[in-house]
């Protein structure tokens, strides 16, 4: 069986990871992750406190070397969301950067700090090397392709997030299909600032460069200056969500250094939500470079992309990746054969890139598939040459804000628990920066003293996650309901 990270096994002396002023070569990463892997080997499942730091990347690589399934945890998780993730995934221990004060739900677990990196950087030899072992290839043989690698939590329309179990073969299938589509090589240097508890930032943005034997420079947090600096000093690729490209498009007219940096990039890739054509055009006009879009999902990893050698067409997500079966299905369940640029159907996919199941949720897993095809819930048309255009989504109760998928029901439940709230409904409204903005419609318990918008936002952030907080709150006397008492969300608009 071939290794997940050949450059680690080969102990390449090229840079692998850079976070701020902390850098590891593939050989150093092999040592740091190898010795951490020895400490966690045999665990049934672990959590990683997924701050955007070198330690998170080392911890995830260590878990993959040891064959221990890993749950990356959003370090901004609110109390209720964290309690759910911990109870549902039942990790045996938590790996974190040293010095982190963990919230109670995780503090109760055994804790392993990623301390070996410090040893490596100080020039000392971590345990695995000091004892004469020659690296993780010796210590850690490759694991079965079907064995779980990562469990990534993702929101649905209602209920708490579900853990998508991603096997090793899904990781290799998707990353190798992207190698093909993007001509991705060991010479590529990726720059990004995505969070490390989702597929985009972690699997594509960290594991992708490591599998190719190339490198990644993580900015810690997104800013234009960091993008400019890295793309002007050797980085070749940029990954981002549309909000980041929107902010780039806004900055370009007054920032010639940014324009020059982007024009020198080999590949600018956007994903996680649709990049508006207006932003595509502004970036192309200012830089001469076209952003390419790829389309994926936590459960399926990557499905389609505009190819590096293909025509970059704004408003499309390109063609199915190598090994991905994709069909459009109409409302009666019939497959749409037409490539006519107008017949709309649900995207259904199959292939080695797919997850195996939702953890502890056989009901949800079964409901997600039809005849072996995964129902994405995304609606699309196909151009005559096969380019896919996403035109909408089946569930109106799923909101994409800043590239994060957020379920309206989850937020409504938390709002209803606030003593100042009698009724609540949550919708997404178009937002130039975030794509969609979370709007809470509130009937206060006491009309004369409604809870403030800030109080409600803080309440949601403290229970669920900061990115799930309402950005706008609107107050009503009553929510519009049909004869059955069901809230009519379509009647709610600002
Ligand atoms: C603000 N903050 C708060 C509150 N208000 N914290 C607690 N309580 C509050 N009431 C904090 C935030 O945590 C954050 O802290 C800061 O204030 C700003 O937050 P926010 O305004 O939310 O940030 P933003 O400017 O809206 O963020 C934009 C962003 C972000 C950077 C583009 O949305 C982002 O990183 N998106 C990436 C999403 C992603 O990776 N999706 C992939 C999943 P601080 O400043 O300290 O951070 S989709 C996927 O994986 C599939 C497979 C795919 O296809 O890719
Ligand atoms: P998540 O469940 O957070 O992994 O998000 C997956 C969803 O993001 C998909 O089902 C799509 O709705 C959306 N998505 C991802 N990439 C794109 C893209 N390039 N264009 C439009 N929507 C996208």
Image (cartoon, rainbow, N blue to C red):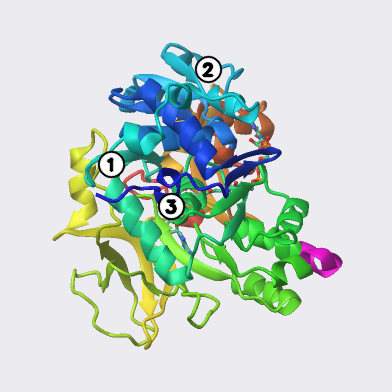
Q: CA distance from mark 2 to mark 3?
A: 33 Å
Asked if the stretch drawn in magenta spans residue 253, the answer is yes
Q: Mark 3, residues whose alpha carbon is within 10 Å: few (<14), some, or many (≥20)?
A: many
Q: Mark 2, residues whose alpha carbon is within 10 Å: few (<14), some, or many (≥20)?
A: some
Dominant secondary structure of the residues highlighted in magenta in the image: helix
- Identify the disc placed on residue 211: 3
**Residue 82 in the figure: left or right of residue 121:** left
Quadrant housing the C terminus? bottom right
**Residue 47 in the figure: left or right of residue 51:** left
Q: Is residue 399 above or below residue 27?
A: below
Q: Earlier in the sequence, mark 1 or mark 3?
A: 1
Image location of residue 157, percent across then percent down:
38, 46
Q: Earlier in the sequence, mark 2 or mark 3?
A: 2
Give the extent of the magenta segment. Answer: 251-258
The image quadrant that residue 265 belongs to is: bottom right
Q: CA distance from mark 2 to mark 1?
A: 34 Å
Camera-side mark, 2 or 1: 1
* Disc 2: residue Cβ within 8 A of ligand 1's nearest atom: no
Q: Earlier in the sequence, mark 2 or mark 1?
A: 2
At numbered mark 3, what does the secondary structure look like: helix, strand or loop? helix
CB within 8 Å, label 2 to label 3: no
Q: Is residue 128 above or below residue 401?
A: above
Q: Which residue is mark 2?
A: 103
Q: Is residue 432 above or below residue 314?
A: above
Q: Which residue is mark 1?
A: 142
Asked if residue 115 shows in the view, the reply is: yes
Between residue 147 and residue 256, name the one nearer to us.
Answer: 147
Image location of residue 318, percent across then percent down:
44, 75
Asked if the stretch drawn in magenta spans residue 110, the answer is no
Asked if residue 57 shows in the view, the reply is: no
């Amino acid at each position: 069986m071939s290794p997940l990270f050949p450059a680690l096994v080969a102990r390449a002396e090229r840079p692998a990871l850079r976070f701020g002023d902390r850098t590891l070569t593939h050989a150093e990463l092999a040592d740091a992750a190898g010795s951490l892997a020895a400490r966690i080997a045999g665990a049934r499942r672990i959590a990683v406190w997924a701050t955007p730091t070198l330690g998170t990347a080392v911890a995830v690589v260590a878990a993959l070397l040891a064959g221990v399934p890993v749950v990356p945890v959003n370090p901004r998780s609110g109390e209720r969301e964290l309690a759910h993730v911990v109870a549902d995934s039942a990790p045996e221990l938590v790996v974190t950067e040293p010095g982190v004060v963990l919230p109670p739900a995780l503090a109760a677990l055994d804790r392993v700090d990623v301390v070996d990196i410090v040893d490596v950087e100080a020039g000392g030899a971590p345990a695995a090397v000091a004892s004469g072992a020659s690296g993780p290839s010796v210590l850690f043989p490759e694991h079965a392709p079907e064995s779980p690698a990562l469990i990534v939590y993702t929101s649905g329309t209602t209920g708490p997030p579900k853990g998508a179990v991603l096997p090793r073969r899904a990781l290799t299938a998707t990353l190798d299909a992207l190698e093909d589509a993007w001509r991705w090589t060991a010479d590529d240097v990726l720059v990004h600032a995505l969070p490390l508890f989702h597929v985009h930032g972690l699997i594509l943005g960290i594991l992708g460069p490591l599998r190719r034997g190339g490198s990644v420079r993580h900015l810690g947090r997104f800013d234009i200056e960091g993008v400019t600096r890295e793309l002007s000093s050797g980085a070749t690729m940029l990954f981002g969500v549309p909000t980041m490209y929107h902010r780039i498009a806004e900055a370009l007219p007054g920032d010639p250094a940014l324009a020059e940096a982007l024009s020198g990039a080999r590949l600018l890739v956007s994903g996680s939500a649709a990049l508006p054509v207006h932003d595509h055009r502004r970036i192309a006009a200012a830089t001469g470079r076209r952003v390419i879009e790829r389309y994926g999902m936590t459960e399926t990893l990557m499905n389609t992309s505009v190819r590096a050698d293909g025509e970059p067409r704004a408003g499309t997500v390109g063609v199915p990746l190598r090994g991905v079966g994709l069909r459009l299905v109409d409302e009666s369940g019939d497959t749409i054969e037409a490539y006519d640029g107008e017949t709309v159907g649900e995207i259904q996919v199959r292939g080695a890139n797919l997850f195996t199941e939702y953890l502890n949720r056989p009901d949800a897993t079964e409901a997600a598939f039809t005849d072996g095809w995964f129902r994405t819930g995304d609606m699309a048309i196909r151009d005559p040459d096969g380019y896919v255009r996403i035109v909408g989504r089946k569930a109106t109760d799923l909101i994409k804000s800043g590239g994060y998928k957020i379920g309206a029901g989850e937020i409504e439940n938390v709002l209803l628990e606030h003593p100042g709230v009698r009724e609540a409904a949550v919708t997404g409204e178009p937002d130039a920066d975030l794509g969609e903005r979370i709007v809470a419609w509130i009937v206060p318990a006491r009309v004369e003293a409604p809870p403030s918008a800030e109080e409600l936002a803080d309440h949601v952030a403290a229970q669920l996650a900061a990115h799930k907080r309402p950005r706008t709150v609107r107050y009503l006397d009553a929510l519009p309901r049909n004869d059955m008492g069901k809230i009519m969300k379509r009647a709610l608009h600002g």
